[in-house]
Image (spheres, rainbow, N blue to C red):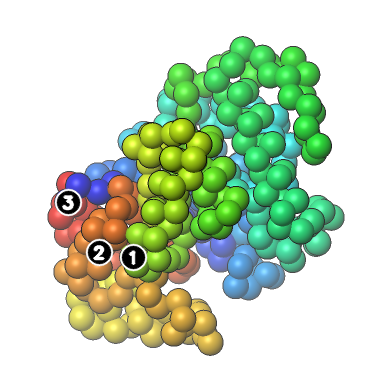
Amino acid sequence: MALKLGLHTGQQDCTYEDLRRVWRLADSSGLYWVSVWDHFYGTVDTNGPCFEALSIMTALAAETTNVRVGCLVFGMGYRHPAVLAKAAATIDHVSNGRLELGLGAGWYELEHTAYGIPFPPVGTRMDILEEGVRIVKSMLTQESTTFVGNYFQVRDAFCSPRPVQDKPRIWIGGEGERRTLRIAARYAGGWNAPFVTPEVYRHKIQVLERWCEVEGRDPKEIARSVNVGFYIGADETAAGHEMERYRKQYGSRAKDSSGAMLFGTPAQAIERIGAYVDAGAQGLNVNLRAPFNLEALQAFAEEVVPAFA
């Protein structure tokens, strides 16, 4: 049951040194991937600290040497895609060719409003995403890019220096069956779904494969990963404490969200992760919320990672 395991380090309610400790542990533990998210505000406590994504992803690239370096996902409405492509190419150099670029339509209306960024209806946001993906993909792979769309225009745009990788992989994040998964089928080298059960994940893969058939795309060309919550403990006692932490953090949402979380001991986590493998996952990233439990993460690296090597 080979599976590429990684961490998704939401950079809220923590210090830079907290993040560095987690990244170093991941980089030395045989994990495949470490990613950040793209938010200006925390998704639980809007007044809490939350580091900006492009700059913290560059720091992640500089701090590590082995893991793939990703973001799940950059909101296309936050930055012009040509500027984002330039930043991505730079990060590919900082990481020596380990960039994984996740793109999405954006969903957090509060931070759009607070920062004066338009938050149009979802259909428009999906149109913006599709135009942006086309520009980013072209700029990372072509000598120059000209594109005239409804939302973005570039003319003879160069992206130099070129990325270290010939074709940096672009991930589409999300689960929307009409637009998101079709955009993934058209353009993506990877697709990620956050916080879904194995049963839902299996269904979403089937939808993606149907869109690949429509678009004339080999579904094997698209890597598939899932993000799940991380609330395991190194032993039974610690696992109980993590369950309490989960309930406090999620409050009224705890019951409805529990199917997309890892609970219990490392042995129980292995069993649950196996259900995602059976559903078709090729990668799985555990989502860390501060305060980071380094003891549990060490147990994950020592006991869970080898089980899927």
> How crowded is the residue under tag 3: few (<14 C-alpha within 10 Å), some, or many (20+)?
few
Q: Position of residue 14 (x, y in %)?
A: 53, 62
CA gap, disc 1 and disc 2: 6 Å
Whole-percent x and y of residue 162? 56, 17
Q: Residue at position x 29%, y 84% from top?
A: 240
| Secondary structure type for disc 3 | loop
In the image: residue 183, left or right of residue 287: right
242 relative position to 13: left or right: left
Q: Is residue 83 above or below residue 171?
A: above
Image coordinates for residue 96, horizontal then vertical, percent: 43, 25
Find the distance from the CA under tag 1 to the CA under tag 3.
15 Å
Q: Which mark is residue 275?
A: 2
Tell me where residue 108 appears, x and y as whole percent. Answer: 68, 62
Query: Given the image, on which type of amino acid does mark 2 rest?
Result: Ala
What is the secondary structure assignment of the residue under circle 2?
A: helix
Which of pointers 3 and 2 lies earlier in the amino acid sequence?
3
Please name the residue shown 15% across and 55% down the image: 307
Callout 1 touching callout 3 (CB < 8 Å): no
In the drawing, does residue 218 fall left or right of residue 91? left
Residue placed most toward the observer, 97 or 193: 193
Callout 1 amino acid: Pro
Q: Residue shown at 19%/47% (left/top)? A: 2
Residue located beneath label 3 in the image:
1
Q: Are marks 1 and 2 in contact (CB under 8 Å)?
A: yes
Query: Which residue carries the number 1 mark?
Result: 198
